[in-house]
């Protein structure tokens, strides 16, 4: 019996009968079907024995008073014929009359032979209800009271006088558990990045051993150029995921921006027209992010529904503008975008600089703190003054603007307005972000990890070619990397969660 009956104890859109019966459905079954007569009889008798006041068993449970809702929770527990009943704050938020009835019911359950464990912060409640009380402080049992010793005064005294000793014990344990720098690092945000770097070097060494051409300047340059396009889009996806959302529209947006640019950034066009093309890419990206953020925050779409809607719309616009690949990109512009310093594309250097700036902002600036706070716990963030709507909308605009940078790289790489290009970047960007250790639940991640995840992902795709493997292996390796990243991330979060606060 959870303490928060509305969030954890009841399904408020279901009826009184459905809430009471849901844990005991197997007991109302005949062969492969539910026996409605048996269900109505058992549920009705139990609700009647608990004196639940409702206009009918099929009334919405949300229409009941707090005390009657709590009795429905108790009815469900009893119908499941439990071996043990755990009541967490059983009278929280109920009136005095309902409280007395709940005490009586719990005593009757105990007398019937079912052990009842009550967790309560009300010492007076424990005194009148329990045969034995374990007083706990900071996770430790500090006093065990039985029989006549179970009094409000003894309970409160044990809790108050034992707190300091428990805190000191916790502090010692905390120092022991945090003394290892390696332990702190393994539960930190940058552990996945180091692991990915190790995988990158190991994979590179293996492929080089099979094919020495793998480390040629041409191949290194090709890999980093592809990383530049994916990296910018993945950085944007990281921002969306940090808010606890996701942006499925980044792939079609990149393709759509390339299609739009293919009408302006062509051979024979004036400098003003080319500048206008880039300006339109920026404006359309900002508008797309604004639409995504508005749908999520004000129209109340889920992030998946909102960005999927925009995904479909952008794909439609791309095919409307260009039914077939056309509009070849200005050669001088393409050469400028793909210029290199040695074997390293300048665009990749820019990507690294942008990544470091975003990482600094994430850790050191208010924007980053508000972004992570929103993704960690929206309600708590709102209570401490974070403007959630503004934060999320600006996050999706930033996501689209970074996607526009990726589209510029894509523009130079494919060199033509192709409506079919760009769609695959939705999946690959999410893959790169997950590999980098960013949580799909929001609130935790790194831009550095995303960059390294992008490098590894492109490297894997490139390595399959040098190893002579079919395209099937590309998908297999991507899936394997995501699975490994998810498992390692979950283990790290579990260790962090189990550590003392």
Image: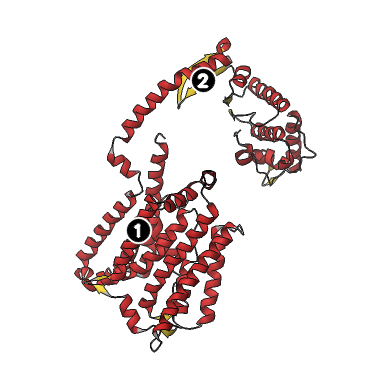
Quarter of the image for the N terminus: give it: top right
Q: Residues within 10 Å of mark 2 (few under 14, many from 20)?
A: some
Residue appearing at x 69%, y 38% in the figure: 20
Please provide percent x and percent y for residue 18.
70, 42
Q: Which mark is residue 404?
A: none
Q: In this view, does 294 lie above or below 145?
A: below
Q: How many labels does the image show?
A: 2
Whether residue 50 is visible, yes or no, is: yes
Name the mark on residue 134: 2
Judge whether 117 appears above or below 14 on screen: above
- Marks 2 and 1: which is nearer the front? 1
Q: Earlier in the sequence, mark 2 or mark 1?
A: 2
Give the CA distance from mark 2 to mark 1: 52 Å
Question: Can see residue 307?
Answer: no
> Could you say whether the residue bearing mark 1 is in a helix, strand or loop?
helix
Q: Where does residue 67 sit, x and y in percent of width and height?
A: 70, 32
Rendered image quadrant of residue 309: bottom right
Q: Residue furthest right?
A: 55
Q: The C terminus appears in which quarter of the rendering?
A: top left
Question: Label 1 belongs to which residue?
Answer: 357
Of the pair 124 and 145, the residue shown nearer to us: 124
Q: Residue at x 26, y 73 (%)?
A: 340
Residue 132: quadrant of the picture: top right
- Secondary structure category for the residue under label 2: strand
Q: Which residue lies furthest to the top in this view?
A: 148
Task: Examine the rendered structure and indicate whether residue 264 appears above or below residue 15.
Answer: below
> Which residue is most to the bottom?
268
Q: 475 above or below 89?
A: below
Is the image coloured rainbow, by chain, by secondary structure, or in one colour? Answer: secondary structure
Q: In which quarter of the view is residue 466 placed?
A: bottom left
Residue for point 31% across, 44% down: 185
Residue placed most toward the observer, 214 or 351: 351
């Amino acid at each position: 019996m959870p303490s928060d009956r509305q969030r954890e104890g009841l399904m408020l859109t279901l009826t009184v009968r459905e809430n009471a019966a849901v844990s005991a459905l197997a007991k109302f079954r005949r062969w492969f079907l539910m026996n409605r007569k048996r269900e109505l009889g058992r549920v009705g008798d139990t609700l009647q024995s608990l004196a639940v006041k409702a206009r009918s068993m099929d009334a919405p449970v949300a229409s009941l008073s707090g005390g009657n809702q709590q009795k429905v929770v108790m009815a469900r527990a009893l119908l499941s014929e439990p071996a043990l009943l755990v009541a967490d704050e059983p009278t929280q938020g109920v009136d005095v009359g309902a409280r007395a009835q709940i005490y009586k019911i719990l005593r009757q359950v105990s007398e019937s032979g079912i052990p009842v464990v009550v967790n309560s912060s009300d010492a007076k409640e424990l005194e009148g209800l329990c045969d034995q009380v374990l007083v706990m402080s900071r996770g430790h049992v500090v006093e065990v009271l039985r029989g006549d010793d179970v009094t409000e005064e003894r309970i409160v005294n044990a809790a108050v006088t034992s707190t300091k000793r428990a805190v000191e014990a916790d502090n010692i344990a905390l120092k022991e558990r945090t003394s290892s720098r390696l332990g702190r690092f393994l539960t930190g945000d940058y552990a996945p990045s180091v692991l990915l770097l190790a995988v990158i070097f190991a994979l590179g060494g293996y492929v080089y051993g099979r094919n020495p051409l793998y480390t040629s300047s041409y191949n290194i340059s090709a890999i980093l150029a592809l990383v530049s396009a994916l990296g910018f889009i993945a950085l944007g996806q990281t921002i969306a995921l940090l808010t606890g959302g996701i942006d499925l529209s980044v792939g079609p947006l990149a393709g759509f921006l390339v299609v739009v640019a293919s009408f302006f950034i062509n051979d024979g066009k004036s400098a003003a027209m080319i500048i206008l093309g880039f300006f339109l890419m920026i404006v359309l990206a900002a508008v797309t992010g604004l639409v995504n953020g508005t749908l999520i925050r004000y129209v109340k779409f889920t992030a998946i529904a909102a960005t999927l809607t925009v995904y479909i719309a952008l794909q439609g616009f791309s095919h409307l503008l260009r039914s077939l690949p056309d509009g070849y990109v200005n050669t001088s512009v393409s050469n400028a975008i793909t210029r290199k310093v040695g074997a390293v594309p300048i665009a990749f250097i820019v990507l690294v600089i942008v990544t470091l700036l975003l990482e600094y902002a994430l850790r050191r600036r208010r924007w980053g703190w508000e972004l992570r706070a929103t993704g960690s716990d929206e309600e708590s963030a709102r209570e401490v003054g974070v403007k959630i709507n503004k934060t999320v909308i600006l996050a999706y605009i930033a996501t689209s603007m970074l996607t526009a940078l990726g589209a510029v790289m894509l523009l130079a790489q494919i060199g033509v307005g192709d409506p079919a290009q760009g769609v695959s970047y939705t999946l690959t960007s999410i893959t790169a972000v997950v590999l980098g250790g960013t949580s799909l639940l929001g609130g935790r991640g790194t831009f550095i990890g995303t960059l390294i995840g992008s490098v590894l992902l492109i490297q894997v795709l490139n390595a399959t070619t040098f190893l002579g493997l079919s395209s099937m292996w590309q998908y297999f390796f991507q899936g394997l990397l995501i699975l490994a990243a998810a498992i390692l991330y979950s283990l790290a979060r579990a260790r962090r969660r189990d550590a003392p606060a």
